[in-house]
Structure formats: C-alpha cells, structure tokens
Image (tube, grey):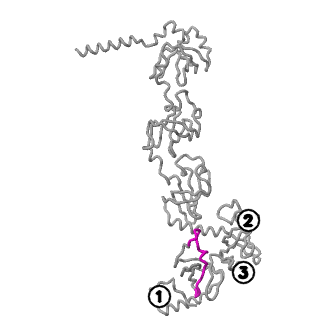
Amino acid sequence: MTEKFEGNDPEDMDEMSFEELFNSYDAKIGQELKQGDMVEGKIISIGKSSVYIDTGTKSDGVVDKIELLDENGELPFQANDILKLYVVSLSESEVILSKAISGAGKVTMLEDAARNQTPVEGKVTGVIKGGFDVDILGKRAFCPVSQMDVRYVENPEDYVGQTHHFLISRFEEKGRNIVVSRRDLLNEQIKEEQKLFLAKVSEGDIVQGCVTKLMPFGAFIEVAPGVEGMAHISELSWSRVEKADEIVQAGDMVTVKLLKIETREGDTPKISLSIKQVDANPWDNMGSAFKPGDQVMGKVVRLAAFGAFVELAPGVDGLVHISEMSHTKRVLRPEDVVQQGEQVQVVIKAIDQDSKRISLSIKDGLGDPWTGITTKYIPGAVVDVTLEKKETFGFFMNLEPGITGLMPISNIRNAASSSDYERLKPGDSIPVLVQAVDEDNRRITLGSPEQKESDDWKSFAPDPKKETMGTMESLFREAMNKKK
C-alpha cells in the first residue's frame, strides 16, 4: 500500500532526501505486529467514524472513533496526539486497533492477553459467592468482589449487565479457569487522572466535587475521577455542625476550595477541602449587620455550664451568660431557661470583632422589673409576699417575679406574731409591711403589718416636709453666700 504522510510537516518532507524516505519506509516493513500487541502510535487523521493511527509499520492502524469519545460524547484528541491501543486483527492493508481486546478478537488471544497484561473486554453476567461471573469472548471468567472496583462494593447486583475492561490475572486449563481483575486497571487509570488533575490545579482553587462518603469527622469528596479529598466537619459550614449529614449527603454535587495538597511519591495525594470557605466569612460583615443595643431573634445552638450560645446568623454565635438569662430568678443551669434548638429573643450587649465574640442578654429583652418600683410599692403599704429563703440575718420574701425584699431578723423578733414568721416554709404566703424602697440598689426592707398601726413604719419612710425644708434651707444658704 501507499504510505501516508498526513501527520508529517510538509516543510520537513522537503528537507528529507528520497533516500531517507525510502529507508524510513523500508525500516517499517521489517516491523511485524501480531494480535494482542500494544501499539503506541500518533494520530494521522480523524475521519467521520474512524481515527487513523501511525502504527510504526507499513500498515496504518484504524480504530473506531466511538471508542475514543469521552463521557460527554466528544473526542478529546487531535492529530499528532499519541495513543496506546491494542491490535485486534491484521490484514495487508490495515491494522484494526482497539482500546482493549474485545469481541472483535479471537479466544486464542486470551492467553496472550494474560501473559502480556493486555486489557480485555468482558460483560458481568451474574453474582456468585465471593464475586462475579464475567463473559469474555464467550469464555466464563471469575472476578473476585474485591477486584471489581477500587471502592467497597456495597450492592454487587448493580454491576450485573455492565461491560468493563479487565486484566487476566490467571489463565489455566486452556481457558477453563480464568480469573480477572478490574481493580488493577482502574488504579492505573486513577494514577493518570491524578497526574492530569494535580498538574492543572493549585491550593486555593475552587473546583466541583461529588460527596462519596460521610464520616463522624467530615466528608470525603471526589474532585476528579479517582481523586478524593476530605472536608473536615469544621470546614463544612460557618455554622456549628454536629454531624456531617446536617450539611451534605452522599451523592451531592458541591463546590469546594482546595486548602492543601500533599503529594507523596508512590502514594495517593492527601487533599484538604473546604465547603464553607467558598463563601465569605460572615464575621466580615458583622459591623453592618449588628450593633450593640439591637434586639434580635436567634437559635440556641449549644448549652454550657456558664451559659448558652445563640446563633444570630449562619456562622455567627453569641454567648448569653447565665447571669443574663433572667431578672425574675437565680439561674443555676442554662437548661432551666432555654433548650437547644429553641428560638429566643436577645439583646446585643457588646461585639468584639477581633476576638469574634458577642455578648448577649435574654433578660434585657424582657425588661427590668425594678424599673419604677418606687411608684408600685410605697412605704407603709401592706402586701402579700411569699417566703423564698431563710437566713440568719433575715428572711427573703418575694413580692412578684424578679422582686425580692428582706425582712431583717430584728423585725421578725419584734413582731407581735413572730412565731407565725418562724413557722413559715419556702413557698408559704404572709402579709408584710413595706418599710423602705431603694430602686437604685434594688433593695426593699419589710416589716410586720402591726408596725403600721403604731406608726413605726414612718421612721423608715422619707419625710416629704423635711426634704422640702432641707431643700429651701440649702437654697437660702447658697443665695447668701453669693451676696458675700
């Protein structure tokens, strides 16, 4: 046949002598191919349905174009690209090539394929104990379940009916005992994919990936065929995450940032990923989103012995200290006031942008019950109270939620009905006299009601006349001093 030179540069041909061309052609005549041989050749030309390859012999190779298409149905190659293919059949005019030995070959090729580690095409026909039945050129072969895939095979039935390329690891008894492996072939492909991927990306790049597996510490994500990275649970979201499945599920397509790529010779590269860092840190916009004094709704995301953490926005938590939970009672445990997952209204007390800390208050959002207390409880008034606690120096009495007064021990002993007070138990009610109210220091002094009848309570109450006279005297003295 006539030698084709479509893949050569015309200018180079002009510089070549006829003798050089003849010697080149003559050298190819001396090269022989046989079925099952692997050929590494250059693409000469691309036709509508076939791709022509320079086999290094006098006969050009032909491979069906459809065999070379990628997953998108596109041909990722062009003229002069180098391909590795296998000889399926030969004639004087052409060499039929394929990516693997397939049905186009002969059964006698299987022994050579086993010896030369040439990939063969097989169809999975059934699931048996320990592996799969595989049909290869009409011969029954066995593929162990561990050799079907690089990942753990959870559902073997999913592979039945699929056609794959295999390597023959055992060929005995003239083909009556054939064992094949797909795993080794996939590992080789994965290494090539890894090289291509790592050559075109660098740390900080944003790429697409598919979640393959969830673990307590994070999620494994495939960012290229056979190339997996791990996003730690702390890198799944700016919000606090307890379990990975709160954010992603196996099979989800996600956008990730390549945080770190550690390549080790002869080993799989270790890749650290982040989902949350694809978006901006929410703390960067804190200054415009919140300010001290704002009243906002938030979600209780975590309880601690000293308070509750409340999420104001995804990734932005603040702390309600236990002392900021209630005006009306002394809180010993945060769970006595709030529960995890509950929506609460809080007031922002302070924001520390540098330390990324926010101080919150629940009680400030409810209002201070001591505000205006002097107009509500006037000295001399008799009110019903409930005993909260007994101390050696007096009894604490609750007037209303958040308002507690003290009845000094001296008032209890001087009361005509002192025995009634001594018999009281926490939660019991009894009438008392309001003797004095100090709103600024949050103090109310209580006495027994009979003190009102003897006007003793007046000694505890401020005298409006004395206050007025005192004010007039001070003004008069000030005026006299100015005249001097």
The part of the image, by quadrant, that contains residue 399 is: top right
Q: Is residue 229 above or below residue 142?
A: above
Q: Which mark, residue 108?
A: 3
Helix, strand or loop status at disc 3: loop
Q: Helix or strand or loop: what does disc 2 sit on?
A: strand
The numbered disc on residue 131 is: 2
- The furthest residue to the front: 48
At mark 1, the secondary structure is helix
Circles 1 and 2: CB atoms closer than 8 Å = no
Question: What residue is at 65 percent from the left and 83 percent from the top?
Answer: 89
Residue placed at 58% from the left, 72% from the top?
69
Instruction: Specify the amino acid type for callout 3.
Output: Thr
Task: Tell me the magenta residue range.
Answer: 57-74
Label 3: how many Cα within 10 Å (few below 14, some 14–19, many 20+): few
Residue 406 picture location, percent across and down: 52, 18
Residue 124 is situated, as x and y percent measured from the top left of the image, at 71, 69
Q: Which residue is mark 1?
A: 13
Residue 106 within the magenta-colored segment of the rendering: no
Q: Residues within 10 Å of mark 2 (few under 14, many from 20)?
A: some
Choose mark 1 or mark 3, whichever is in front: 1
Residue displayed at 55% across by 21% down: 398
Residue 378 drawn at (x, y percent): 48, 16
Q: Earlier in the sequence, mark 1 or mark 2?
A: 1
